[in-house]
Image: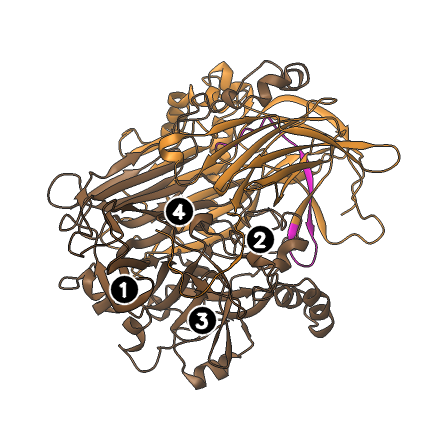
Amino acid sequence: MTTTFNDATTGWSFVALTSGAGNKPPVGGLALQNVQHHLHNFAKDIRLVGFWLDLETVKPPNTVLKTEKKFFVLSDEDFQVSDLQELAPKQPTQPAPKSIFKMLKDSADEALNFKSYFADTTGNYFGYGVRADYMAPSFFSPWSNCEFEGLNINQIFLFARFSNTPAHEPGGVLTAARFHPMVKFEFIPNKKVDLTREFVRVKSIRFDYRLHLYIDKLHDKPASFGELQPNNAALFRDSESAKIGAAARVVFQDFHEAASRAVFEAAEKPLVLEVVAPGLDKGFPSYTEGKNDVKCWDNIHWWGTRDPGEPQLSTPGGFHAAHLHWRWGAGVSIAPHGHESQFGPGSVPPVIRKHPAYGGKWGPLLDPKIWVQTIRIAIVKNHPELDPTRSGVQLKDLSKPDFYDLFTKRSRDPNDIEKGADLVAWYSAEVHRDVVWWDPKGGTFETAPIVGTVFIHGIFFPHEAEPASPPLTAGTQKPLHWPADAATIRKEKRWFRSG
Amino acid sequence: MALVSTRVRIHSLASPSAIKEEESAVERVFFEILGVADPIRYRVLVSESSGWIEYVDTEQVWRKGLPPRLSDTSGAKKAAEDFLRSLTKALSAPANAKLPESLGQMVLMPPNLKPTELSQVLRPDGSAADHWLYRARPQLSATRPNRRPIDVFGSQVEVRVGAGGKVISYHARWRPVVHEHVYVDLAPFPRADDPPPNALVYLLEGDGIPQYYLAPYYLVNTGHELSFASASSYSLDVVIIAEDGKEEETRLTAYVGGGSGNYTFNWAVYSLQTVLGEGYRELGEGTREPLQINDNSKVMTSRMDIGPGAYVVMVNVIDRETGAFRHYRQEVFAPVKVEVELRAPSASPMV
């Protein structure tokens, strides 16, 4: 069953799936379809697939006897489920004097006062939302002597208004609406836990999302529709240094490509093949695996496929696209608004960020309480067996203990998607609760949060005409592939590609 | 771009609620132009938070069933532009005596519309084109005596044209202006010796953002990105910088450019995680600190400290000399402060 939501003031609309019994969300939690903003398509289906708990049985003081990974789907099997709640925004007001300029000059206090615009401080004036709550006071009862007793999860899908403030990108020129599909978790401590004997602790909690984004395909040349693909996507890793910009201008004769090279350390635009990729490793934008340095990506761009021969999405730019940034590189600090905290230096504690291991890079845009997260990404075709809207496909089959296995074990080689396809993004956020060693000399820090919210950075969605003439044309509309070029990517056929 | 005049117009914006009050009159205008009558199917809306006007034929946009017979490019363009001309005439007082007096005092339609795009929009299943999307950028005259129109950045008008060349949707991200205005000096471009590509634009902030007037800014292409620079004493430019504060706090400092330097501030904050249930919190004017710019001038800044968390911080700024106003927001990810301890690897995590 479905319920249609349409908020005329923010311009967002969608259909929410509901269970057969009343107004509760279906098994799996909030599932929103046909998401549009001002009649522009944004997504076909957005939902949380489920969550994993990584549990350890510990013999005191700290010997791990056994580990266990268990997958859960939000449902009344494990939780008390609330009704789906619509949270409509209040409407801002504004003084309407006879003379605006006189009022601003003579009655500045009225203009300064926030209650002149948002009269009720307890009210929500800023976004439209849907919410569902999942309570399980005895969630951990199957485990003997667990550090936690209960688990509460709140899904808050927040749709913000269309504006250019807060700035969505470092120039502050892109007007967009934001979508924050937040999931808040809270572990309820077990007051009776006995840590002097064998106990169970939660090492991590991991939330897997399925984001079937869809951005309208705008078509300038009427042609055969059978040849047209719906969407393309791209991955980028931001530059950490403005110095690269100066070098780029010398090396690249094309002004706009130089601008892109200055801003991005790595790019795959459009994605050549399906991909599984690292977005963050325990809060770090890069990590070491064996002898290899693995660099994580920072953002995804998503757009309606261009007609053959037409220019690609502009980057930087992306005036009609979905932008999913979980980290910005320090290189944007040279932009007028690049120093602002919606871009950096991020949620990582300063002492960590300044440590040589972090290298002074900017940290991710996460809930500061749970900055130790691992973000993993997959962008693949909408395969029928991975589509929960199809009969017979169950959520429990749409997530594996190793996130990447769902895709890499399904097919030996990734499919070619360079010309576009019906694509789906899978986004996984794992919140770590174990003590993490980051200094070979023995320095550590404690990370054991019991409450936090994932996907707080959201996705922003501008839908403007792509500018055709200077000075708005900052980025390039050419394909961008580096350090590996498109031919190499296609030849190597690797699923896992780092930034 | 060289501009002959050095005086630029600051346009007052109409109150969104004043437009909203006359929503039924706006609806009548649309119905007359389009020859329709059913308010359930044909939905006209004036946004109470922004003053934006929208119309949609709910049965034609993203329709199901057989694909519509769309006109060709020139037919779609003509349909959209004919509609916009009719709407402009019908929403102006001299041409439409039936318009309520309050609406007649507003410029409900942009006096200039610069076409920016015309595309067919495909159905999500890719089976066919659903409609044409015509986009245009509103413009307003800015300077005197040479009344050249400039873009209103952040605004856009969209007309969707469906089967048989019928207009099936109109959406104006345009807040009407009123006739009250002032002229002020156009500030010279900051880098006169070697100016990067730039254009003079007005800036419309967006839905639900407190804004009283349209002021000009230079839209600048720096080579790395696009940005704005103040172009008049009413064009305040605000930046909030976050730095480590004392103990657990993050220090926010608001810097303002473009005005006299004599600014007053007021801060507020909401949390992304709790705004839907808890609203926002007023923080006050912060600590004002003058910043020496050069030997002769100071600029007032404001400082505010907040604890760890993920927020949207808001600041209202007024220039006490001119009355120039700007409402500004910023996301703040204020980190938790930790002390690194040397600890043996056998230590248990905290519970």
Residue shown at 47% from the left, 56% from the top:
A326
Of the residues shown, which amino acid type is indicated by label 2? Pro
- Which residue in the protein does label 1 denote? A59
Mark 2, secondary structure of its residue = helix
- What's the chain of the residue with tag 4? A
Q: Quadrant of residue B304?
A: top right
Q: Is residue A268 above or below residue B145?
A: below
Residue shown at 53% from the left, 79% from the top:
A485
Could you tell me how far apart the alpha carbons at marks 2 and 1 are, in whole angstroms? 34 Å
Chain letter corresponding to the colour brown: A
Residue A275, image x and y in percent? 39, 72
What are the residue bounds of the magenta stretch?
B208-226
Q: Residue furthest bottom?
A: A491
- What numbered label is drawn on residue A180? 4
- What's the chain of the residue with tag 2? A
Colouring style: by chain
Mark 1, secondary structure of its residue = strand
Mark 3, secondary structure of its residue = loop
- Which residue in the protein does label 3 denote? A271
Q: Are marks 2 and 1 in contact (CB under 8 Å)?
A: no
